[in-house]
Amino acid sequence: MASVTPVSTTSSQELFDRARALMPGGVNSPVRAFGSVGGTPRFMVSAKGPYITDSEGREYVDLVCSWGPALVGHSHPDVLAAVHAAVDNGLSFGASTPAEAELAQLVMDRIPAVKRLRMVSTGTEATMTAIRLARGFTGRNLVIKFAGCYHGHLDGLLAAAGSGLATLALPGSAGVTEATAAETLVLPYNDVAAVEAAFAEHGPNIAAVITEAAPANMGVVTPEPGFNAALSRITAEHGALLILDEVLTGFRTGPAGYWGLTGAVEGWTPDLFTFGKVIGGGMPVAALGGRADVMDYLAPVGPVYQAGTLSGNPIAMAAGVATLKAATPEVYATVDARSAELSAAVSAALDAAGVDHSIQRAGNLFSVAFGTSATGVHNYEQAQAQQAYRYKPFFHAMLEAGVYLPPSVFEAWFLSGAHDDAAMERIYAALPAAARAAAD
Ligand code: PLP
């Protein structure tokens, strides 16, 4: 395989200064600006296995993994070979290709409840289309989301957290109209009674409930046992749809995502799933899928329109197919084991430094919440009430020691099947000093 050519040796500071003059905040996605941890974002030029390298040649153990997609490790040889082979055949045809059905089949083999799949390019498109489809199918307007759950940047789901039951949301972003926000009901997470109450009041107008299969965008929050099952039951009782957002958890927490760990065992199935991240292995791929009668409401079969110039792009499909094939049982066993080891090591280091915390866990996803040991974190209110300021010194101590953590306390830590002993040792060696920094 060709060796990687350094893209730049310019410092991250110089690159950031230049980028800020050219792009809003110097970034193309806000969290990359290091806003909540401060300091200069690292500009990355290459990644291999569990490591990522910045523009000055500094190598970090990567616990972001591209925010999830790099499940099998960066630059996995099978994935790169598949992409190189696809590139040689041309970049995009704007026509159907064999690889689309191959990827769809791999998804359905893992999640039989997916009877039809539509490929899109981002998780936002997947959830946006799922919402439109749910409205088109049910003929209803309202959507329930949970405070602290992130589903992408579509207008209706940026609605801010309202307090109390069935609060009509205020826009969570400038540019979102009140009329749009008013079609989203924001409820507290893990609160079945709030969902029952919302349906009692608005039932005939509710098209769908959308929920992260396990929230990982307010830090990780475990769905209480039976919570997702209750959503499935309540939506079915009222003729609404359940959209299980597995953009982050899908194919990461197990071959069949978080649903595979819960719904498949407990006997409930959402009407629609959304996928992203791992399904494209680092290329822009996402998808929605589920019940055939609902999915067949999509154009060209049905009346709900959706389209995409680059949907099902052949390079992206090749990366997705190769990634799912490389996601063997051994990969999941490694990620599960590393997650258990690492979260225990983080907790032990924080304990030794006298830092109150809880480890938040959902399958092999975890995050740390500071000052929350008394209650843990079960909803957005508790997530926001934590001692978030402790993360900043912790993060920078780890960064200086060569460990790249998510630059926000409200994100999950991502591992891969490539995180070997050497990579883990580097993380463990960095933890005591970082924990002491968090104590100050
Ligand atoms: N849904 C969930 C659960 C996510 O975590 C994300 C992104 O992090 C999205 C949707 C949006 O995906 P994208 O960033 O590809 O638009």
Image (cartoon, rainbow, N blue to C red):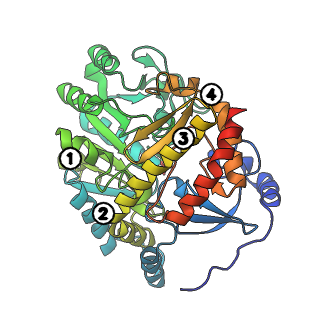
Q: Check disc 3 and give the amino acid type.
A: Ala
Quarter of image, res 210:
top left
Q: Check disc 1 and give the amino acid type.
A: Arg
Q: Say which residue label 4 marks.
A: 387
Q: Residues within 10 Å of mark 4 (few under 14, many from 20)?
A: some
Report whether residue 392 is seen.
no
Q: Check disc 4 and give the amino acid type.
A: Gln
Side of 14 relative to 294 (left or right): right
Q: Say which residue label 3 marks.
A: 348
Counting residues from the start of the chain, the first of labels 2 and 4 encountered is: 2
What numbered label is drawn on residue 291? 1
The answer to whether the residue bearing label 2 lies less than 8 angstroms from the nearest atom of ligand 1 is no
Counting residues from the start of the chain, the first of labels 4 and 1 encountered is: 1
Q: Residue furthest front?
A: 352
* Residue at mark 4 to residue at mark 1: CA–CA distance: 42 Å
Image depth: mark 2 or mark 1 in front:
2
Image depth: mark 4 or mark 3 in front:
3
Counting residues from the start of the chain, the first of labels 4 and 3 encountered is: 3
Q: Check disc 2 and give the amino acid type.
A: Pro
Residues at marks 4 and 3 touching, judged by CB atoms closer than 8 Å: no
| Residue 377 higher or lower than 276, as above or below | above
